[in-house]
Amino acid sequence: MAEEWNIIFSYTRKQAIEDRVLIDVTEQANQLGFKVNTCVTDHLYADYLVPPAGLEGEGQSLEGRLTDLLFRTLIAAKASSAGDRTEFDVLFLMKPGRWNTAHVLAIMGPGDHGEPVLTIMLPEDE
């Protein structure tokens, strides 16, 4: 018995990327061997990927931190048997000599047109 639902509101992945709620990192992900559109949430991006002030002399960059996250995602996905999602921890330098562990989720799901897409996020972003 099929029910008809009136859609009150829809928010597409494309709109989320345009609004910068999701940050498209597909180009960098492709360089590491990812084969799907890949985004990180704005929360993960702002809180961990953008290097905090004071780390300029510590060899920290957005590109390097993103590469570390993507590489760790790739390793976790290959080791996971969970199917469409994996959880793992990533260490980020937050101040000289102070590291924070971020618990991260990587979830494969359907994109706006049913294509597979990957979203990397913090648990509270799910």
Image (cartoon, helix red, strand yellow):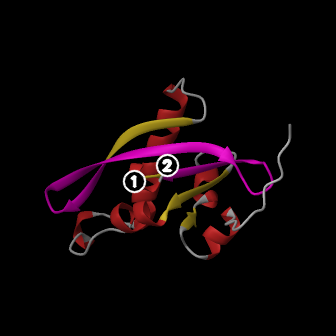
Is any part of residue 34 visible from this angle? no
Task: Give whichever of discs 1 and 2 has the lower sequence position.
Answer: 2
Q: Give the image location of residue 69, x and y in percent.
A: 43, 50
Alpha-carbon span between mark 1 and mark 2: 19 Å
- For residue 95, side relative to residue 20 (left or right): left
Q: Is 110 or 45 nearer to us in this picture?
A: 110
Q: Is 65 or 58 nearer to us in this picture?
A: 65
The residue tagged with tag 1: helix, strand or loop?
helix
Q: Which residue of the protein is positioned furthest toward the left in this rendering?
A: 97
Tell me which amino acid carries mark 1: Glu
- Total numbered labels placed on residues in the image: 2
Q: Give the image location of residue 113, x and y in percent.
A: 80, 54
Q: Which residue of the protein is positioned furthest toward the top in this rendering?
A: 81
Q: Which residues are magenta?
A: 91-120
**Label at residue 28:** none
Residue at point 39%, 62% (across, down): 49
Q: Main secondary structure of the magenta part?
A: strand
Residue at point 67%, 71% (across, down): 15
- For residue 3, side relative to residue 95 (left or right): right
Residue at point 78%, 49% (across, down): 114
Q: Is residue 41 magenta?
A: no
The correct choice, above or below, for 122 with respect to 89 in the image is below
Are the residues at dot 1 and dot 2 in contact (C-beta closer than 8 Å)?
A: no
The correct choice, above or below, for 75 with respect to 30 in the image is above
The correct choice, above or below, for 104 with respect to 75 in the image is below
Q: Which residue is mark 1?
A: 124
Q: Give the image location of residue 2, x and y in percent.
A: 86, 42
Q: Is 72 or 122 nearer to us in this picture?
A: 122
- For the N terminus, the image quarter is top right
The residue tagged with tag 2: helix, strand or loop?
helix
Tell me which amino acid carries mark 2: Leu
Q: Which residue is mark 2?
A: 70
